[in-house]
Image (tube, helix red, strand yellow):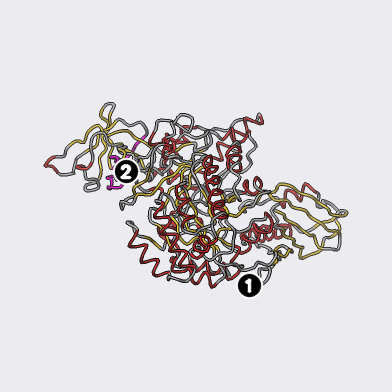
Amino acid sequence: MHGALCVAYSGQCLTSEALGGRSANRGECAQACRMPYDLISDGQKVELGDRRYLLSPQDLSGLEVLPDLVRAGVASLKIEGRLKSPEYVASITRVYRQALDKVMAELTGEPTPPFEPKTARYELEMSFSRGLYTGWFRGNDNQTLAHGRFGTKRGVFLGEVIRVSAAAGGSNRGAGVHLRPVAPVKPGDGVVFDAGSPESGEEGGRIYQVESAGAEVVLRFGEGDVNFRKVHAGDRVWKTNDPALDRELRATFTGDKIRFQRPIALEVHGRAGTPLTLIANDGEGHVVRLDSAVPLGPAEKQPLSTDRLREQLGRLGGTPFRLDRFQSHLEGDVILPVSELNRLRRDAATELDQLRAQPKRWTLREAGKVAPVGSPSLEVAGRTLPPLIPASPELIAVIRDLPQLDAAWSAGVRTIYCEFENPKHYRAAVTRFRELQSAESTAPIADLRSAISDLPSTTAPSSIWVAPPRVFKPGEEWILQQVRSCAADGYLVRNYEHLTYFAADRKRGDFSLNVANPLTAAYFLDRYGLERVTASYDLNFTQLESLLQAAPGPWFDITIHQHMPMFHMEHCVFCAFLSSGKDYRDCGRPCDTHRVALRDRVGADLPLRADAGCRNTVYNNRAQTGAEYAARLLELGARSFRVEFISESPDEVMRTLTRYGQLLRGEVSGSDIWRELKLLNQLGVTRGQMEAAPQVIHRKT
């Protein structure tokens, strides 16, 4: 509902993992999307002025669409606030609470509480803002989502610098910045001067004095706080901090004052001669039961009526509770000292508060046990999966351009995975694959023997598999129909919709399913009939070892060579920065005619591709190899190894696959492959996350 927008789809960002061994999927995002990039189209830099933060979306603010969401039946709203301050939490929660109360009052006809949208937006921007936008709530608008000017906090826009007044003697003392403010500004506020190049460092500080000069104001700062030589006319001025607002927000949560009382239910039971039993229930599974220290006595006058008990037990001021419902199940006219009622009330509130403070206790259900590697079968959810017969090592080529198909076949690879930008080209790939199959089946015996001697060691028959786009949305069924129409041997399943759509087809799980443990693998194999699943790209080698030690190796495709797919995103860089259109309907489809890359701060050109749904993927420019780990993976039972390509030439594809085939046959070592790839590839190769230090998560006590 509100907060920083990840530019990539959840679970589909491998950038931090690929570049630094930090898993964004496990909360260790390095925020590479907030870094500056240059746009390279067909080998040439595209001049975009001060727009360099091409992957940094504005922050999400759903305030404008809140009434529409409520009317649509949305019942839960999430506010994102990773590593944010308590003031941020207090501010954003307060604004949306007030806005939601207003919406609900309007829908129910109750008196509308006060709510000022302009004041609310000011508070949202001051709390934290890279610019506020409704994101994808109102559809795609690639021109607005990521403006590209900055990727860091700004706040409230104050205006542009008109001029900088010089100080006597050329010093900073007495210098001032002139502007026409479009938002309130006062002494103590923090500001930053935006010259359009945040990566070069920016000037800013706290305002010491605000002087009126007609329609203008002059901002003055403490001596030495601002280098005015770096502030120029036309620079944008942003208000980044409002101390008065911070004090107001801190007052809402600091101190011992109880600021929210949760409704609870109380009920009493008992009869003369027995203790009074008080039961307190918060409605969320926390229940306290207490008995009085003295028994109930018969009442000659003023018995414990329901109203009297409600009044006495409902005195919950100074506690985090308020009485909502009360029931009395007392039998006959009875009485209990008021002091004992008060003690019961206090003790019940204290114990209920302590119960609520305890962490939730999860109950683990024995759904099945995972057998160790080498076991003939594996039991999951009470069912036993069939035993897997170890096969000879199989090399799989993942290609993204049609000319790579013949090269892969010539290198002896007989299992091909295709991931093309346009699924309509799958038909041509399948047709060509069938021609190659037919030619091989009719070749003379002597030629077959010669060819077989060069093949990777495998007993699997030749097959071609195609991949639908990673993300599916309602209305995109036509893409899946186009994928299936190619009549491939099987399909790479990449999300849950694919599991349903391709239920009757041969299918294997792709890396986007994020299979990182044996239970997940067994679930997909058993429940959905997948032949294999690809091990998650989020795993380093130690974690991959653990996976193969806990489940049979033939369950998995292991990727040992690839350009890591780092960002997978709805944001279309082609549309945003190579057109003036909002989406595919008016962008002119520059993705069809240009080869585009993003150049990062160290000069690396990261390839960019768009799929049939206009979703973009940014790939690592350097290939990642796990060749040095292949021997150990084979020892652990792995049998299917993926080698992936992006835009490599047919010669590169053939050379690379030939060497990996020799690796699996034991003719060369992983170290040989590593050294050779470093020499042959202009950009070199990397081990990527494979050599990252394993993350140790300690058990909570």
**Of the image marks 2 and 1, the number of the one nearer the N terminus:** 2
- In the picture, the quarter occupied by the C terminus is bottom right
Mark number displayed over residue 48: none
Query: Is residue 87 shown in magenta?
Result: no
Q: Amino acid at mark 2?
A: Gly
Examine the rendered structure and indicate whether residue 239 appears above or below residue 367: above
* Residue 82 placement (x, y as % from top left): 48, 52
| Residue at the disc numbered 1 | 372
Q: Magenta stretch: give its range.
A: 184-207
* Residue 447 placement (x, y as % from top left): 51, 60
Q: Mark 2 falls on what kind of element? A: loop
Q: Amino acid at mark 1?
A: Pro
* Residue 86 placement (x, y as % from top left): 47, 51
For image coordinates 39% across by 51% down, the residue present is 649
Number of marks? 2
Q: Quadrant of residue 391?
A: bottom right
| Residue at the disc numbered 2 | 43
Mark 2 and mark 1 residues within 8 Å of each other at the beta carbon: no
Of 341 and 507, which appears nearest the observer? 507
Q: Residues within 10 Å of mark 2 (few under 14, many from 20)?
A: few
